[in-house]
Amino acid sequence: MNESDIIIIGSGAAGLTAAIALADHCRVLVLAKGELTGGSTAWAQGGIAAVLDAGDTFDNHINDTMVAGAGLNRRETVEFVIENAPQAIERLVEMGVPFNMDEGALHLTREGGHSHRRIVHVDDATGWAVQAALLKTAEAHPNITLLPGQACIDLITGRHEERYSGSGRVWGVYALDQASGKVHAHVARATILASGGAGRVYQFSTAPRGATGDGIAMAWRAGARVSNMEMMQFHPTCLYNLEVKNFLITEAVRGEGGILRHPETGHRYMPDYDERAELAPRDIVARANDDQIKRFGLDYVHLDISDKDPDFVAGHFPNIYEKLMGLGIDMTKQPIPVVPAQHYTCGGVLIDLAGRTDLPGLYAAGEVTESGLHGANRLASNSLLECFVFGEAAARDIIARWDDLDTPPPVRPWDESRVTDSDEEVVIKQNWTEIRRFMWNYVGIVRTTKRLERAQHRIQMMTHEVEDYYGHFRVTTDLIELRNLLQCAELIVKSALHRKESRGLHYTLDYPDMAAEAVDTVLVP
């Protein structure tokens, strides 16, 4: 049993922000499933939204967020996050994030759904710069231990105490050390989930390989409620290339004048769908792209910014420009082939403004949560912002309650006395592929009740198979991820079947209209 003061699951923006905020007060252990840079933060291209321009206001940003979220946002959360955004940017500047400047001030760009320029960025690779600065700060602090290569299996609760308790109190997590193959019990006074989303439940996704919904599934199994899991955001413009998977073409390309066109006729079709055209929120643009591809039997659509000054395009999007040139596409002279792909999990573990979940001792921050910020559709560049604000909020609450947080009791070690090594790894691969395919086809951008029921039927069959497999064989990272993916798929489908309307990211042909009242889909274990 390894004891720390605080355990943080995840080494991205939310997890490291919390760790740094806590480290002057207590000993923090940060567990990462793969590399410390393996989460979604490092992949974020666009930037961070904050009101920093004289002509902009908090009310504008709040209104844009609520409009994008189709009224499903919780206003108090939206106000809380947006009003704390400028301080979050300030702290990142202090940590050395080299944001782009313009005549001595932060350079601000604009993205779909925003009424003003308010996105601070580091070229088109903001996430990588933020990840590097946070890691450097965390590594320099003697109270922070960073432990990569740990695949978390299940939260340790009162049920795992040597003296059994039904309290639901979370004491830490059982994690597989990938190098040794041993499972360790990591315990602490409080645990923060910052493990990211569940994007890899879909066949096409911009999410990193490890985005398998581990935190959502673990919290659900431990007894926490989850909310709005049907609200799965699809990014409208992922590069279509058979060799390169998951390469995102940032929203900012459209923000700076990129046009979506039919690849054969050249027709600019976005004005046919929405008066905001290319600057409409993501759900509308993704559905339009999906509709064009399906209606005309296309493999992709074109995103074209070639009418802008070549130096401006190459200078503003250097990483995208370089990547595309390596694939034989010159974005200053020709259009980019793009398709929609799963991009962000707007639902998740239900939290309050202090990052507290339903379970005593368990906090959560970032994409693993449903805080009320995003509602039915996340506004561009609000995601990293949520990580910083809630990472800080959870840390503040833990420090304020420190004297009330008990030290962990003795817990039972991981029991693998009745399992053997697997001789059927093919089962995992087959099920993984199957889940991702039927989720894409049946629970994608446009849904129907019949398709959702087909997905539900397949999930029920696979659940028995995976549970049987899990009960007989030693855990591996692949098995842990498969179990969590299947759990998240079940939660997404259950939530989607429950919502009898179309709102934001949930669009169903059986209920095309939006209901008069916006109601969260809250699932209780």
Image (cartoon, rainbow, N blue to C red):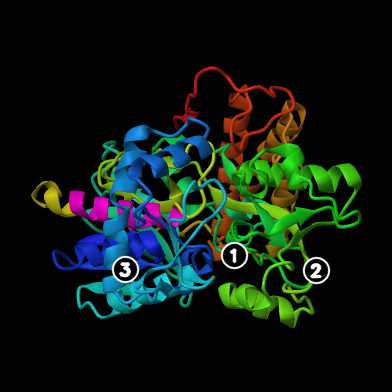
Q: Position of residue 36 (x, y in %)?
A: 43, 73
Classed neighbour count for the residue bearing mark 3: other residues with Cα under 10 Å, few (<14), some (14–19), many (≥20): some
| Residue at the image point whose x is 19% and y is 53% from the top | 396
Secondary structure of the residue carrying numbered label 1: loop
| Residue at the image point whose x is 12% and y is 49% from the top | 400
Classed neighbour count for the residue bearing mark 1: other residues with Cα under 10 Å, few (<14), some (14–19), many (≥20): some
301 shown above or below 123: above
Contact between labelled residues 1 and 3, with CB atoms less than 8 Å apart: no
Residue 524 in sight: yes
Numbered label attached to residue 242: 2
Secondary structure of the residue carrying numbered label 2: loop
Numbered label attached to residue 45: none
Count of all numbered marks drawn on residues in the image = 3
- Classify residue 321 by image quadrant: bottom right
- Whichever of callouts 3 and 1 sits on the residue coming sooner in the sequence is 3
Q: Mark 3 points at which residue?
A: 92
Q: Name the residue under label 1.
A: 209
Q: Could you tell whether 388 is left or right of 433 in the image?
A: left
Q: What stretch is highlighted in magenta?
A: 383-397
Asked whether 393 falls inside the magenta stretch, the response is yes
Q: Is the magenta stretch mostly helix, strand or loop?
A: helix
Q: What residue type is labelled 2?
A: Leu
